[in-house]
Amino acid sequence: MRISIVPVAAATATALLLGACTAVSPADTTYSQASMDDYILAAVVSPARPAQDVARDEARKPEQIVAFSGISRGDTVAEIAPGGGYYTRILAQTVGPEGKIYALMPSFFANRPGGLDAINAIAEQYGNVEVVVVESYDSMRLAEPVDLVWTTENYHDLAGGDIAGVNSAVYEILRPGGFYFVEDHAAPGTGTNVVSTLHRIDPDAVREQVLAAGFMLDGESNILRNPADPHDVAPGDFSGVSDKFAYRFKKPE
């Protein structure tokens, strides 16, 4: 099926959405004049997304966050610890049939009865998602270089272990010029002292660690910042929306 897109935002998003409605898999459809903003919008408003994901959109602002990450149509993306697949679904539709999502799941999930059921269901639903089980993220390897490594609200957990090894592994699997996107709960001025207790991390510590791995800072977004967050309780214990930071790092060409 080939769809011609009228270069008007509303018409474009509608056409893309209709494409998503005909089949959840993003295959076999060409949108010749769509922009990345159109693709991202269509992925966010897709009826393929479950209601519990949509209910989180106001707090997570996926349209703006995905656009900030530097993603492009046709990209190959490695998503670290995708959890329930909130972003996996959006990323899969955004990159389209030309692209691919490697959902990198930790082995302890795979070893639990039914631990991979949810992400395997998403991989079956979207034809461009491949589940990869990794023993540890500091030793992850892929069969091909990727354009984007993505992690949201997981970096603080990684920082409780060999974070230098993780960032080095990310560097290795990225193509030159590729992006490393990190979004997490903020705990300014704490370094890595509360990563295992409050499940937060100091944005400055993240920047220092990733730059030490050879990356360049390519962008910072304040779209998820919330100065009302007291920063001294776990995000789940705070009645509001937690203060989050987002960085886009780049591997030198």
Image (spheres, grey):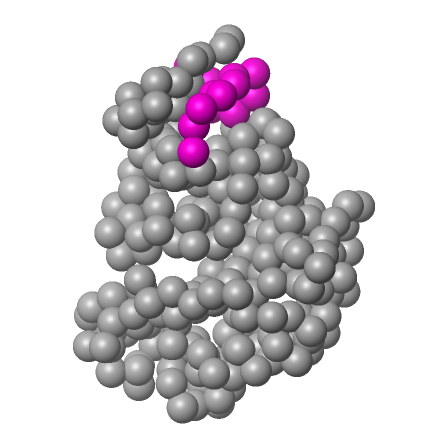
Residue 183: name its quadrant: bottom left
- Give the x, y percent position of residue 136: 71, 65
Give above or below for 182 relative to 55: below
Residue 239 at least partly seen: yes
In percent of the image, x 60 and y 35: which residue is there? 74
Q: Nearer the viewer, residue 246 or 114?
A: 246
Residue at position x 44%, y 38% in the image: 36
**Where's residue 82, x and y in %?**
53, 52
Indicate yes or no whether the magenta region holds residue 221: no
Please state which of residues 55 and 96 is positioned toward the viewer in this rendering.
Answer: 96
Q: Main secondary structure of the magenta part?
A: loop
Q: Residue 18, position in %: x, y? A: 36, 18
Q: Residue at x 64, y 55 (%)?
A: 178
Q: Is residue 241 left or right of residue 92?
A: left
The answer to whether any part of residue 236 appears in the image is no
- For the record, the magenta segment spans 22-35
The quadrant where residue 253 appears? bottom right
